[in-house]
Amino acid sequence: MALEHAILVSLLEQPGSGYELARRFDRSIGRFWTATHQQIYRVLRRMETDGWISVEEVAQDGRPDKKVYSAAAPGRTALAAWLREPVEAETVRHELAVRIRAAAFDDPAALIPEVERHRDGHAALLAHYLYGEGRDFPAPDTLDARQRLQHVVLRGGIEYERMTLAWLDDVLATLRELAADTATPSSDSGTGTAAPTSTSTSTSTD
Amino acid sequence: MALEHAILVSLLEQPGSGYELARRFDRSIGRFWTATHQQIYRVLRRMETDGWISVEEVAQDGRPDKKVYSAAAPGRTALAAWLREPVEAETVRHELAVRIRAAAFDDPAALIPEVERHRDGHAALLAHYLYGEGRDFPAPDTLDARQRLQHVVLRGGIEYERMTLAWLDDVLATLRELAADTATPSSDSGTGTAAPTSTSTSTSTD
DNA sequence: ATTGCGTATGCAACTCGTTGCATAGCAGGA
DNA sequence: TCCTGCTATGCAACGAGTTGCATACGCAAT
């Protein structure tokens, strides 16, 4: 489990309340580790009883009190130990890829709107990343260790989005070709939702 | 939930037993949707009671009987409906990115071996994909709809691995620079595991 | 003979993650 | 004035995913 560690890193970068953490997980950190406020509150309590973090109740002017957490020494120690552990194999959940293969057994054109929506989302995120890079790292040669590490993670996000965007265009081109193929030539089987020829012995691709 | 649908696609591509599916999820399909045999067996039973798939008990020569599942008509209908639903936002769990940012609060050099291991794994996977592409799609212009969709998913995997490989090299270069920086110049703070300067006000990057 | 491995399925218990709801005060607009 | 929305925390229930173990057959090697 790495949620503890993600929270710890976030608190080391900047102490904050559960609510503030939840918002960070909707923004910067959430790009590579998602979590809901429920998970965060639950884990924060556990981390506090384990002594990884310390709390300070802060009364605010016009809003509810908040509990501001900061990383404690045992948390740092745990983080250092974690850094030396083997990286867990990433569990991939790439729904779009499943859908694309699923499209072979239905109408490929039906998928196009969703892929387009997805594509636009990635394009927007890429633009957002690039804007953030220009703003936060205007002079890449004058950064301290922390900023350089943040920057290399951001570069990863940028490259991921670039790659995804190019791939989604490839997917869209393929889907559109297939839609054109099944629409124009000899009236194949009749019904619009009909499956393509499903007799070929599976290509394995493993 | 898309595990049902991933299983359905796999069964449409080729009927099989729970065990066979589990192996496919360790191989081709597992590249974009992971599942253990436990999940698969559980979901298969549910899908069967829902009528999405049909079973046939097959006695084998020198091994235990197996239940061979195949997709049924209601399953196809459900898949077609699913294809038209909005794509769920991918929940990202990128542990390495968390670790890289964590490295700022510990010794960046400590991360290098794990990143190298990770890098080599991705390099091997890329080679495997490229081999599979050459074997299964030697003539990309003569493919049917199903193969073209499988191919575009594979291209996504290839581009992902290429991008990841390049990024991990970037990460390694950054980590090595930081390791060299903290090792050679003016004896900064003393202990090797000491944290870098942690006073800068957080760059947001959101 | 026994051990270990691969096929094949499954139970039980657990943790992780999600969803819906509740509270509670304040700010701003219809 | 009422309603919506934001800050801030939390409970309860559920569903998804993981881990450990159990069973049972046959094959091959020690």
Image: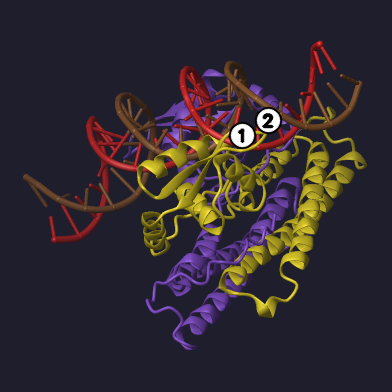
Chain colours: A yellow, B purple, C brown, D red
- In the rendered view, would you say A83 is above or below D10? below
Q: Are marks 1 and 2 in contact (CB under 8 Å)?
A: yes
Tell me where residue B4 sits by quadrant: top right
Q: Is residue B65 visible?
A: no
Disc 1 residue type (three-letter): His
The foreground one among A125 and B79 is A125
Give the mark, 1 or 2, whose residue is nearer the N terminus: 1
Residue B15 horizontal side relative to residue B110, left or right: right
Alpha-carbon distance for marks 1 and 2? 6 Å
The foreground one among C3 and A16 is A16
The foreground one among A149 and A198 is A149
Q: Residues within 10 Å of mark 1 (few under 14, many from 20)?
A: many
Residue pointed to by mark 1? B5
Residue A147 horizontal side relative to residue A7, left or right: right
Tell me where residue B97 sits by quadrant: bottom right
- In the rendered view, would you say C11 is above or below A111? above
Label 1 marks a residue whose chain is B
Mark 1 element type: helix
Label 2 marks a residue whose chain is B
Q: Position of residue A12 (x, y in %)?
A: 51, 57
Q: Position of residue C4 (x, y in %)?
A: 21, 53
Name the quarter where the C terminus of chain A is drawn. bottom right
The foreground one among D19 and A199 is D19
Numbered tag placed on residue B79 in the rendering: 2
